[in-house]
Image (cartoon, rainbow, N blue to C red):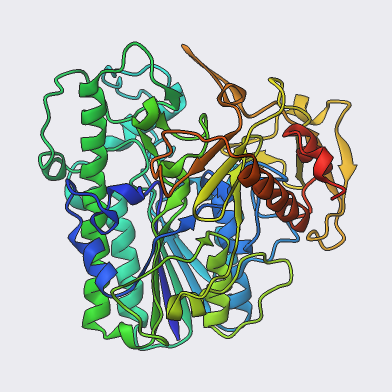
Amino acid sequence: MKAIMVMYDSLNRHMLETYGCDWIKTPNFCRLAERSVTFDTCYVGSMPCMPARREMHTGRLNFLHRAWSPLEPWDDSMPEILKNAGVYTHLVSDHYHYWEDGGANYHNRYSSWEAVRGQEGDPWKGIVKAPPAPETITRNRVTYQYSHDYVNRQYIKQHDDWPQVKTFDAGIEFINNNCEEDNWFLQIETFDPHEPFYAPKEFIEKFPDKYRGLLYDWPDYRAFNDTDTPEDVEHIRNQYAALLTLCDEQLGRVLDIMDEKNLWEDTMLIVNTDHGIMLGEKNHWTKNIMPWWEETAHTPLFIWDPRSRKQNERRKSLVTTIDLPATLLEFFNQPIPDDMEGKPLRNTIDHDEKVHDYVLFGIHGGHINITDGRYVYMRAPATQENQPLFNYTTMCTVMERRYPLEDLQRPEVDIAGPFRFSKGCKMLKIPREGQPIIQLPNTRINLFKYGTLLYDLKTDPHEEHPIQDKAVEETLIREMVRLMKENDAPSEQYVRVGLTSYLDE
């Protein structure tokens, strides 16, 4: 048996034709839907990038215990379990966060891996005197990312230069070299269509608009301000659409080789993403600094299982990111570790069997969210200060850096644990400032101000009108507490969102 996972970053469900988009043509995603099962009720677990990837290794929630960081020593890694069982696992990716301090041990869980350089702020080419970046409409991005991004663009001019294209080149090469072999798992993962929305000229030209301002393909993490115009929103959506169209083209290459090599007979295909992105909806850009609304939390998912051979069908059952590692382990006939909370989706793919009544999702220090597929309940921090809040980890790195010494020198740092999932290991308990209060130049975002929110997706699928329903809220609170207990959530998380009164029920 073989398996291929094609993974995108920030792939918006509502921008795909198969999920109802009527203005961006994505023929290969439509072709994929005809050859697979399309999931209509898939939700994220932990966000953003590396927390989601930890869950795709471990099959358990990340966000209640810590923010962005590497895999922990006690983590059960799906690719490593497969590797140790004799299944060859290969990662090819241009997602440069894998090679920063805060993601530095994910790729080594695979039998082999290949890195493609040049996305976003990847410190790729050594240019001592970088060319000045063109003026942009936004001023909030840090200089580090801007400078390296613009250096990278000097080497990404033609279609085949794009890191995404090179990533798929490498994935296709692996398939060509190994299609006659058995027992392998290939993960083709691209950073696109994550911002900045830099796409080949021929794709940009497919989406003309009336915008005539300065270079603008990289929106900030913020709510709208007085500078945002309808023309800005249209332009950013068009830039995203252009990059998404490139994603569709590259997906077609995988479908082509599956046809050519007849891989549909014995190869599982999963096409997924880590989360979506806000493109002006509800007057917000991107992610992290607002509640995780449908645009970011409700994600596309497609799976072809050669055992059931179900295709051109849709599934309504509630599923989540943490189900994917269990699904792959079951496919390769490997036992699922006790610490994995996700469920294998074999029967859901086959006949829409329910595997979850409710799922949790969130970002460390943000709202704690729960859904049953109809209602979404977002529990806000109980106070403006959003405390207490701690990171529990033995891996003291985050994104591109090590933890600041002043964070580790604070007198509140302690030894904690073990948790039920940490295999007897204790860890550092490090105080963290409240995630919902983020200071950016010209912008102050405070998730506390949004308050606790309840939506009925049946009557309000775009989450535009929060409702008040005490009975539904009480049910969702109790299920939230139950799932937090199952996850062995730290006690202060209940304090932080005002749920301590439910602990003894």
- Residue 69: where, in percent of width, then height? 64, 45
- Residue 42: where, in percent of width, then height? 46, 58
**Visible residue check, residue 389:** yes
Q: Is residue 453 left or right of residue 273?
A: right
- Residue 152: where, in percent of width, then height? 32, 37
Residue at x 10%, y 34% (from the top left corner): 208
Please say if 480 is above or below 125: below
Residue at x 11%, y 44% (from the top left corner): 202
- Residue 467: where, in percent of width, then height? 52, 35
Please say if 373 is above or below 77: above
Image quadrant where residue 109 sits: bottom right
Q: Is residue 121 left or right of residue 263?
A: right
Residue at x 81%, y 44% (from the top left corner): 502
Total marks shown come to: 0
Please say if 150 is above or below 423: above
Quadrant (top left, top right, bottom left, bottom right) of the N terminus: bottom left
Q: Observer-nearest residue: 34 or 328? A: 34
Q: Observer-nearest residue: 55 or 171? A: 55
**Visible residue check, residue 215:** no
Image quadrant where residue 402 sits: top right
Please say if 111 is above or below 107: below
